[in-house]
Every structure is written in C-alpha cells, then in structure tokens.
Image (tube, rainbow, N blue to C red):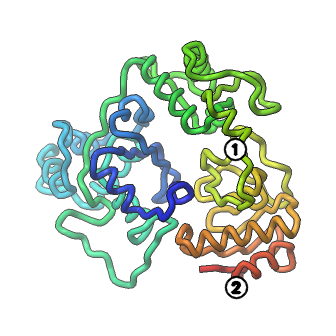
C-alpha cells in the first residue's frame, strides 16, 4: 500500500519513523503461516487508534515475556530470554519457544518493536513480499537472537478507556482515510468500539459518533455516492475534490485490501466469470478510470478480467509491468485467466506486449 502513495518508497523510510518514535506498528491478527494484518498509527494517537488487544491462550512463557517488559522499557531478544528464564525459575528458555511466544503476542496486539525488520524477516529472507531478497547462505542467529526477533521489543500502550475518545478518534481516522465514509468500508475494517469491554462493532458503533462530528460542523452527511443510502459522511472539502478530479488516464495497481480500492467494501465487485474477487491479503486489483479491469490472486497465478476489452487489458498489463520493474513486486507469474489457462485468452497478448515471457506454467515477469 505504501509504495502506491510514496514516490521512491523504500522500507527504510518507514523504519526511520518507527525508530524515531513517530509511528507505532501493531499486529491485528494472524493470516496463517507467517503473515498477518498490521496497523500503523501516529505514536501520539496510539492509545486511541490501536485496535483492542486480541485473545491469546496465555501460557507461563507468555506471562513471563509480558512480565519482562512490564516496566515500560524496551529490550532486545536476549534480554527478554534472560528475564523470562528468571520469571519461570528455569536455566534457559529455548529460542524457538520464545520466538513463537513473541509473535503470538505481536499478532494479539500486545507487543511492538522499534523497527519492522523482524516482520520482514518473518515474511521471508529479509524483505516484505514485495521486496524479498533470496540468499543461499544460511542465516545464523546473532548475539541479539534470530532475525525474526531483531530490534527492541516493548509492550504496546494501554488503550484509551474513554469510549467517547476512542469513538471520535476512530471516526476521524475513517474520514481522513476514505474522504467519504459509508457502511461498507467500516464493516470491511471490522471497526469496534470499546465500552469498558469489547462490544458489538460495525457501522452501528461508528454511526452515532459520525453523526456527532456532523453536528459539530466537522463533517457533512448526504447522498454522495449513488445507491449507498443517506448514511454517508464526508469531510467538507472531499466532495469538491471528487467533483474536480479528472484523472490522468493511467491505471492504478493497488492491493485489493487497500482503502483506495472501493470494490468489495463500499461498492460490489462487477460480475466476473471464472473467479471470485475479494479483498484478500496479497491480492491485487488494477483500476482504470475508477473501474476494475484486472484482478490477481496472491502471487498472480489466477486472474479475473471482468470482461475487459483488449485496450483496457493492455493498459492493465503495462501498469503491472511498471510495478514489477519499479520494485513494487519481485516477480509475477500469471497462469490462469477467467478460470482457464492464460494461453489463448485476451490477456495473453496484453501480457506479452508488456514484457511478460512464456514459461511452462504461464507468463512471467521479473
């Protein structure tokens, strides 16, 4: 998501903000394997904006890790291991067990780190999915522990207990993020409100706060997007910006779960044959003048074209090729299109013209 917004984006840019204490990152639940959802918030707003911690089956080791960090300080992995061993009255704690416990607490929203380096290492060989670097050399554990637990670990701040403050912060963030807030995006994000304990979420939890923001003159309510009812809220200048927007005629390649992609949230996906588009982690969508023309499952193996014509597919393929060449994706291999092999479909000549090369399995670009 960040490379789509920041020209010349490099992971080090985000690390500068986290190391400088300006941005906090938190896990918001695992996705299976070594992946998971991550939330980034300004540090001074973390108590109000961070989601409530999730549940974790707390073992003595989990309790020992949390106990080692209870004084509010930040510790390296080996320091945590030493303190955890003391908490449990044992001579040592195995690295594997401690790494697993740390990441379970991360995905539960309990622990943070001053850099995203361990997250990149967890995702694969020192880089995110979009910036992987492969090496034949074995990765040896350093003095501070394995690469997946590098940096300093600390307990994330206690969440704001006042539900009014939490609700206002969430509503303000939604308005900033979407410009026009409707029911769909709120449900897609599974926004929850805290009232002393976890309560029901969704649009019903945010609507009263948005209405209060409107009454205070900081938002407007109206029929901004056709077909989505009257429960729509927007920043005062958002509608004027939408009316003035003409686009540059260049397709956008976005993560399917990106807030900038309204499909699957505010708007329904167009009818498609041979696939079921969704806002899955790792999936991509190409928007051309606001309409989806191409959807790719994680890794790009399966594509959905939404019945797009040759011209739209050529523009989408060129946009994908630019993303790969610009480093946004390490590689892309398309094997199927609309439920059939990509060879012989309208997508094949579009991808070849954009620079994709045939392989036994499909069309690839690195």
Q: CA distance from mark 1 to mark 2?
A: 32 Å
Secondary structure beneath label 1: loop
Instruction: Indicate which disc residue 357 carries.
Output: 2
Please give the residue where the numbered disc 1 appears in the rendered image: 262
The image position of residue 272, as x and y in percent, is 84, 55
Q: Is residue 255 left or right of residue 151?
A: right
The residue lying at 55 percent from left, 67 percent from top is 328
**In terms of image quadrants, where is residue 16?**
bottom left
Query: CB of mark 1 within 8 Å of CB of mark 2?
Result: no
Say which of 151 and 169 sits in front: 169
The image position of residue 239, as x and y in percent, is 69, 33
The residue lying at 67 percent from left, 59 percent from top is 252
Secondary structure beneath label 2: strand
Say which of 351 and 117 sits in front: 351
The residue lying at 70 percent from left, 63 percent from top is 296
- Residue 236 against residue 74 in the figure, above or below: above
Is residue 205 in sight in this rendering? no
The image position of residue 82, as x and y in percent, is 13, 53
Q: Earlier in the sequence, mark 1 or mark 2?
A: 1
Q: Is residue 294 left or right of residue 46?
A: right
**In terms of image quadrants, where is residue 347?**
bottom right
- Residue 335 against residue 43 in the figure, above or below: below
**In terms of image quadrants, where is residue 161?**
top left
The residue lying at 68 percent from left, 30 percent from top is 182
The image position of residue 179, as x and y in percent, is 62, 35
Label 2 Cα neighbours within 10 Å, binned few <14 / some 14-19 / many ≥20: some
Is residue 89 in sight in this rendering? yes
Q: Is residue 126 left or right of residue 306?
A: left
Quarter of the image that includes the C terminus: bottom right
């Amino acid at each position: 998501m960040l490379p789509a917004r920041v020209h010349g984006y490099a992971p080090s840019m985000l690390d500068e903000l986290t190391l400088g204490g300006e941005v906090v990152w938190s896990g918001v639940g695992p996705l299976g394997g070594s992946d998971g959802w991550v939330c980034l918030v300004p540090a001074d707003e973390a108590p109000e904006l961070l989601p409530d911690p999730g549940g974790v089956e707390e073992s003595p080791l989990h309790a020992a890790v949390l106990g080692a960090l209870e004084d509010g300080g930040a510790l390296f992995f080996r320091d945590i291991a030493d303190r955890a061993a003391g908490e449990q009255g044992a001579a040592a704690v195995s690295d594997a067990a401690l790494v697993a416990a740390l990441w379970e607490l991360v995905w539960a929203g309990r622990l943070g780190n001053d850099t995203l380096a361990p997250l990149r290492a967890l995702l694969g060989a020192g880089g995110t999915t979009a910036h992987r670097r492969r090496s034949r050399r074995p990765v040896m554990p350093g003095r501070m522990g394995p690469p997946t637990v590098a940096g300093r670990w600390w307990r994330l701040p206690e969440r704001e207990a006042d539900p009014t403050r939490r609700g206002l912060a969430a509503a303000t963030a939604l308005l900033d993020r979407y410009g026009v807030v409707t029911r769909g995006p709120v449900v897609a994000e599974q926004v929850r409100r805290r009232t002393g304990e976890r309560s029901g979420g969704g649009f019903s939890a945010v609507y009263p706060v948005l209405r209060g923001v409107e009454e205070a003159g900081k938002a407007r309510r109206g029929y901004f997007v056709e077909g989505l009812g009257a429960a729509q809220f927007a920043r005062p200048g958002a509608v004027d910006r939408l009316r003035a927007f003409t686009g540059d005629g260049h397709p956008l390649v976005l993560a399917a779960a990106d807030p900038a992609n309204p499909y699957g949230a505010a708007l329904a996906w167009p009818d498609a044959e041979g696939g079921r588009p969704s806002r899955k982690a790792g999936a991509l969508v190409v928007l051309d003048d606001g309409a989806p023309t191409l959807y790719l499952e994680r890794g790009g193996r399966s594509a959905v074209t939404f019945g797009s014509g040759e011209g739209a597919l050529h523009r989408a393929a060129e946009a994908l090729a630019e993303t790969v060449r610009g480093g946004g994706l390490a590689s892309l291999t398309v094997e199927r299109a609309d439920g059939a092999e990509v060879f012989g479909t309208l997508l094949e000549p579009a991808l070849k013209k954009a620079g994709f090369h045939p392989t036994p399995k499909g069309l690839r670009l690195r």
